[in-house]
Image: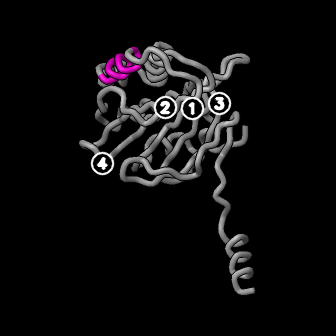
């Protein structure tokens, strides 16, 4: 009887730890990124017309509904992308730099250019990525003064890219003033779509 009572108390007193599901892809509510713990902030789907390209989730040290706070928040962060169709590295190599440039003035993007080109070269080296592949863009503040690390299915791709300004620029692709898709931005910020 005591065990049953304890189980009921736990069930009703603790918040549910359910994964968030988007387009059939489940995103865990928490994940370890480098040395930091993160929680899912929100998730959504990137699509053009009727074609769904990928499902993605944003993980932060704590939840926020404000894009500026998500971008500037200190601590480990993760953008988790799960491909919903076969994709070439060339697709990302074109889209990512374009998304960064749309959210920065020429003066703001100038110090980022060499690092943008490094990311683009890494993406171009990836000939194809199959449906279901998991891509992480991680911010690891404890590594070398802070780096952006790209992994695909757990395998590191290219060199780590230094500087928190670069990771913030990457986040602006989805969370900036000119996001790649407005409803995806809302989803990543945990707002109802």
Describe residue 73's horizontal placement relative to residue 164 as left or right.
right
What secondary structure characterizes most of the magenta part?
Answer: helix
Q: Residue at x 57, y 46 (%)?
A: 41
Image position, residue 155 (x, y; %): 39, 33
Residue 114: which disc? none
Label 2 belongs to which residue?
A: 135
Residues 145 and 65: in front is 145
Based on the displayed image, in which of its 4 quarters is residue 58 positioned? top right
Element under disc 4? loop
Identify whether 127 is placed above or below 165: above
How far apart marks 2 and 3 lie (CA) works out to 14 Å
Label 3 belongs to which residue?
A: 45
Q: Earlier in the sequence, mark 1 or mark 2?
A: 1
Residue interval drawn in magenta: 115-124
Magenta stretch holds residue 123: yes
Identify whether 184 is placed above or below 120: below
Label 4 belongs to which residue?
A: 142
Do labels 4 and 3 touch, CB within 8 Å? no
For disc 3, the neighbor class at 10 Å (few under 14, some 14 to 19, many from 20) is: many
Q: Residue at x 73, y 18 (%)?
A: 50
How far apart marks 4 and 3 lie (CA) works out to 30 Å
How far apart marks 1 and 2 lie (CA) works out to 6 Å
Q: Earlier in the sequence, mark 4 or mark 3?
A: 3
For disc 4, the neighbor class at 10 Å (few under 14, some 14 to 19, many from 20) is: few
Do labels 4 and 1 touch, CB within 8 Å? no
How far apart marks 4 and 1 lie (CA) works out to 26 Å
Element under disc 2? strand
Label 1 belongs to which residue?
A: 82
Do labels 1 and 2 touch, CB within 8 Å? yes
């Amino acid at each position: 009887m005591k065990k049953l009572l304890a189980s009921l108390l736990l069930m009703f007193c603790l918040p549910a730890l359910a994964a968030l599901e988007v387009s059939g892809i489940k995103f865990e509510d928490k994940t370890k990124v480098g040395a930091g713990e993160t929680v899912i902030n929100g998730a959504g789907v990137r699509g053009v017309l009727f074609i769904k390209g990928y499902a993605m989730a944003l993980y932060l040290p704590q939840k926020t509904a404000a894009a500026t706070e998500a971008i500037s928040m200190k601590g480990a962060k993760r953008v988790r992308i799960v491909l919903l169709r076969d994709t070439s590295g060339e697709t990302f190599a074109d889209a990512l730099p374009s998304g960064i440039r749309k959210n920065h003035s020429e003066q703001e993007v100038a110090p980022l250019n060499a690092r943008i080109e490094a990311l683009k070269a890494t993406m171009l080296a990836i000939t194809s990525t199959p449906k279901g592949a998991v891509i992480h863009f991680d911010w690891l503040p404890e590594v070398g003064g802070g780096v952006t690390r790209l992994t695909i299915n757990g395998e590191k791709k290219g060199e780590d890219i230094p500087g928190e300004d670069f990771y913030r620029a990457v986040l602006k692709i989805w969370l900036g003033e000119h996001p790649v898709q407005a409803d995806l931005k809302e989803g990543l910020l945990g707002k109802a779509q």
